[in-house]
Image (cartoon, grey):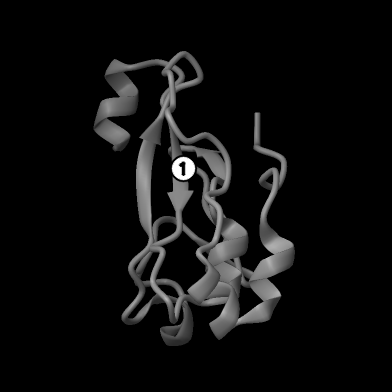
């Protein structure tokens, strides 16, 4: 993504949750976070350059399914912001019920 950012001014990266039923709530909270390509995401009190990044703690990186996607302000996004949680996801972890809504503020 760093190489693409050199050719595409304004390219950023966006954290997207996996949607797995056993996802970590901290990863759900990070969903839709947008950062400059060269800046880390804030996830569960840690800074991660990308999901499963080797600098993160094992509990924050091993067997995680989140993705870092390229993002441009000018792109039309079909599903902006956080995705809604399925009833089964909320039943497994009721804390998710309060996580729906607009994402945390994005970095400039």
Q: Nearer the viewer, residue 66 or 46?
A: 66
Where is 73 relative to 23, above or below?
above
**Residue, x 67% and y 55% (percent of image)?**
100
Which quadrant: the C terminus?
top right
The residue tagged 1 is 14
Q: Is residue 104 left or right of residue 68?
A: right
Q: Nearer the viewer, residue 76 or 4?
A: 76
**Residue, x 54% and y 69% (percent of image)?**
87
User: What x and y, as percent, mark residue 55?
Assistant: 42, 71
**Residue, x 66% and y 38% (percent of image)?**
106
Residue 99 appears in which quarter of the rendering? bottom right
- The crowd level at tag 1 (other Cα within 10 Å; few <14, some 14-19, many 20+) is many
Is disc 1 placed on a helix, strand or loop? Answer: strand
User: What x and y, as percent, mark residue 22?
Assistant: 44, 81
**Residue, x 47% and y 50% (percent of image)?**
15
Where is 39 relative to 61, above or below?
above
User: What x and y, as percent, mark residue 3?
Assistant: 25, 31
Where is 13 relative to 16, above or below?
above
Residue 30 appears in which quarter of the rendering? bottom right
Which quadrant: the N terminus?
top left
């Amino acid at each position: 993504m760093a190489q693409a950012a050199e050719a595409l001014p304004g390219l950023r990266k966006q954290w997207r949750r996996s949607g797995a039923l056993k996802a970590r709530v901290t990863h759900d909270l990070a969903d839709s976070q947008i950062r400059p390509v060269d800046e880390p995401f804030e996830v569960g009190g840690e800074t991660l350059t990308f999901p499963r990044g080797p600098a993160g703690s094992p509990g924050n990186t091993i067997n995680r399914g989140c993705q870092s996607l390229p993002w441009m302000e000018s792109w039309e996004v079909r599903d902006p912001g956080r995705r809604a949680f399925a009833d089964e996801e909320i039943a497994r972890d009721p804390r998710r019920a309060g996580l729906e809504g607009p994402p945390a503020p994005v970095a400039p």
